[in-house]
Amino acid sequence: MISTLILLFGLINLVMSITGRIKGLITLLSIQGFILFLIIIFSHDISLDLNFLFLIFETLVIKTIVIPSLLKIILFENNIFRETEPYIPNFYSLVISSIMLFTGIILMPFYLGVSISTILISLFFITTKKKLLTNVIGFAMLENGIFLFSLSVAEEMPVIVNMGILLDVFIAIFILGLLVKKINTVFNDSNTCALCNLKDCGCDD
Amino acid sequence: MTDAMSIIQDYFVIDSVNILFLLILAVIFTGVTIYNSSFIKTLDLNNNDRIKYSIATVLFVLSMLGTILSNHLGLSWVFIEATTLASAYLIYFQKTKNSLEAAWKYVFICSIGISLAFVGIILLLTGAEGINSLFYNDLYSHADMIDPFWLKLSFVFILTGFGTKIGLAPVHTWLPDAHSEAPSPISALLSAILLNSAFLVLLRYHKLMNLSGLSDFANTLLLVMGILSVFVTAVFVFNINNYKRMLAYSSIENMGIAAIGLAIGGIGTYVAMFQLFGHSLIKAAFFLTAGNVLNLYGTKKISKISGIIKKDKLTGWLWVLCFVGISGLPPSPLFFSKFLLLKELFARDQIIFAIVFLVLLVIILYGIGKVVIKMSFGEPPESDIEVKIHKTMYVPQLVFLIVAATVGIYIPDFFLNLLNNAVIGCR
């Protein structure tokens, strides 16, 4: 059961790498969070232990509901719906991501393979997309991969999982930054291309 | 109560290595605070913003203090994360389009770096089954129990992650933007303390690699990143039109030299320590003086600035002296560290490497020298704005430079002991 869930988690990465609609990406992110929740339910004994409750809260509330809904709010406020022109065509993204996922699964134990390849795929995702919002989604995806990975040492060092949750603070910062709409009002078009003012050249800088 | 105290004593310690970094933090922050007291008046802020600026600065320094003092890899990681959060607001402080861009890049790149460092910590734990502790002392004493495969893999992630914060190429890209857009005292703090405190975490992890007998692997990676940092600086500094970016690139170079020193080992570790110390003092002075220049001319463009010495004598000479310090001409302490590094390279028959290193240093010296001479001498451009600079905006730089020059000429016994102990603690 757990293996199926983890495989599903990995396959969602592939779907994400070809999804153009940002709304779809956010839904997929939320599904990933829910799968993490299911993995925890099936792999841990259900108890009222503080750590366990913390994991449940993190996956079910924050990863499945809070972050995706905040992202959706930004989406509607800014009227950006599509990642129009990624640096690499979606088909090639799919091929590269699949290679990453399957190499990971073949080379490493299943659990580690999926989580490490999720981390790599999300880094690839971030570098190939242009919109700031899709970059943030990529970061949230990276976060999910790391969370899955940290579950492998959760038995021995639960504190490490709790530490990883601090990474969510960053997502919150990005979301807040976008929410306050500063980025959007300052840069009319929220592409990363708008963030190219600071660079090195002999010319007017 | 005693329980809480003992927990704090477990997690925060002062040992032979971090005492040097603590000293640097104390000296630099004192100077920057004195500078800030006048600098903040030049920004034309309302009371609310001043309070925010001060609180964010203190939080930023507090998080760096935590990184330096912590005796636990996880805690160091948390504090490094905190430095990003605290300083992001300060970088965005001037609320211009460029500062927003710099802050966004800074937070985004550094948080990905931090995430990768976290993956490194998990990989370490995967390989260190049975240790279940991230205290450096526990890791050191069980270093032979850690599976070398996982440790190597984790070092790659840790080096990328903390290397992002240190500003080693090729993951340095946030650094020139952030340093050039932040207010000058904050740039000084970023460059002189933040990079050091991230370097300290790397030093501690490097010791673990040494103890597990994987130092060759770690040193190769460090050497590659170090020389790449010097190379990147040489390329970009050559034709640059923003003097704060130039200083930021120079920080990348100096961190690269420290990384090379650490990688070479032996006397190289001594070089790294000395380099970090000298760079902090001189670069802090340089950035603070850059604040004065920005005040006088109101632009960061090199092409629009000339004749600083005629316009404001003291700032002009400070600018030149800082250049003498940073370029490693005697009596700068950086002369010592670069000289010792080259000597060590020659002693080990790494002639080609030494020559490449020397050529890159000369290119950087030429690049920065050209800019500094162009800015300092000649006639200042016509302007009717008279800017008075308060004397507390000169004193800290002077003190930093005097301390640096003193150490460059004569190393007092207590400082020599401090350095020696730090070097021993790194092995």
Image: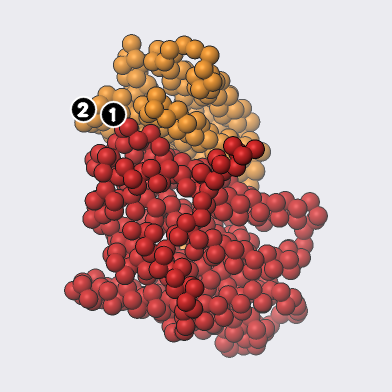
Residue at the disc numbered 2? A106
Q: Quadrant of residue B25?
A: bottom right
Q: Secondary structure at mark 2?
A: helix
Whether A126 is drawn above or below A148: the answer is below
Residue at the disc numbered 1? A113
> Mark 1 is on which residue type?
Gly
Q: Secondary structure at mark 1?
A: helix
Estimate the x, y position of residue B164 in percent, counting from the top left. Answer: 43, 52
Estimate the x, y position of residue B269 in percent, counting from the top left. Answer: 35, 65
Chain letter of disc 1 in the image = A
The residue under the point 38% across, 34% down is B132
Chain seen in orange? A
Residue furthest to the right: B47
Out of A110 and A157, give the one closest to the viewer. Answer: A157
The residue under the point 56% across, 36% down is A169
Estimate the x, y position of residue B232 in percent, counting from the top left. Answer: 37, 64
* Chain B, colour shown: red
Dot 1: within a 10 Å radius of its alpha carbon, few (fewer than 14), some, or many (20 or more) residues?
many
Dot 2: within a 10 Å radius of its alpha carbon, few (fewer than 14), some, or many (20 or more) residues?
few
The residue under the point 51% across, 51% down is B13
- Quick one: label 1 or label 2, which is nearer the N terminus? 2
Q: How is the image coloured?
A: by chain
Q: Are marks 1 and 2 in contact (CB under 8 Å)?
A: yes
**For this view, does A97 lie left or right of residue B233?**
left
Estimate the x, y position of residue A167 in percent, counting from the top left. Answer: 51, 36
Q: Quadrant of residue B221?
A: bottom left
Out of B291 and A54, give the one closest to the viewer. Answer: A54
The residue under the point 47% across, 22% down is A33
Quadrant occupied by the N terminus of chain B: top right
| Camera sees residue B126 | no
Residue furthest to the front: B2
Q: How far is disc 1 from disc 2 in space, using C-alphas? A: 7 Å
